[in-house]
Image: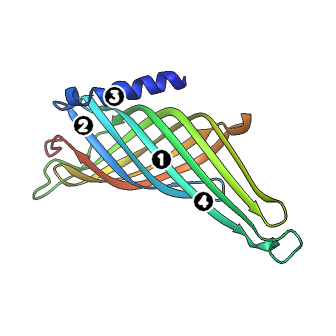
Amino acid sequence: MKNAIYALLLLFVFSLPAFAQEDLEFYGGYRHISGDQGLDGYFGGAAWSPIPKFALFVTYDGTYDNSTIGVFQFTSVGLTTVNSHLQELLTGPRYQLPGLFKGHGHVQGHALLPWVQAGFGEARLHTDVTQVQVGRVQSADTAFAWQIGGGADWRIYPHWAIRGDLGFLRTHFANSGQGRVRLGFGVVWSARSRSTF
């Protein structure tokens, strides 16, 4: 599975010049993922629309959590800190739903463009625990991950939009499954003007 995902990503990257005639978009912003006391970070990605309303996307998330377990700092256990770094690389299809609200002025057509998507790929969780009496312990795992969800693009200019998304992320670390909520806010730049949607 991992080799197939890497092959698709390489094909996507080396085919970018051919995609220039179609609708190509780049996006990025803030990401929050629940679990492990909540992780916050960033996301970035690209999507290609070979036909109207349908896109193939690739997204990378990098989220972090730095926690101090202060309850134990006055005991013989001592101060304990936990640093977590969760990364996912996901790819899959996205389908655009019918647009809502007509735009005005420089934004013509639908101003709100909702969509749904499903992504498949790989996730890696690295955890670093430091405890005064025990010292530092590190652990990491890489496993299959998938997500389903949706969102909407609010067009502010023909080539620019503000994006919000919400979804369910399923990871499979330590030979067991974990369900997480995945929330993001960011900006999107599209090579093709969306003023006619």
In 3D space, how far apart are the residues under numbered discs 3 and 1 (Cα atoms)?
18 Å
Residue 168 lies, in percent from the top left, at 54, 43
- Residue 183 placement, left or right of 65: left
Residue under the image location 50 percent in, 32 percent down: 120
3 and 1 marks in contact (CB < 8 Å): no
Which mark is on residue 65? 4
For marks 2 and 1, the one nearer the N-term is: 2
- Residue located beneath label 2 in the image: 24
In 3D space, how far apart are the residues under numbered discs 1 and 4 (Cα atoms)?
14 Å
- Residue located beneath label 3 in the image: 12
For marks 3 and 2, the one nearer the N-term is: 3
> Is residue 39 placed above or below 22 in the rendered structure?
below
Which mark is on residue 61? 1
For marks 3 and 1, the one nearer the N-term is: 3
Amino acid carrying mark 1 in the image = Asp
Disc 3 residue crowd, few under 14, some 14–19, many 20+, Cα 10 Å:
some
| SS class, disc 2 | strand
Q: Residue furthest left?
A: 105
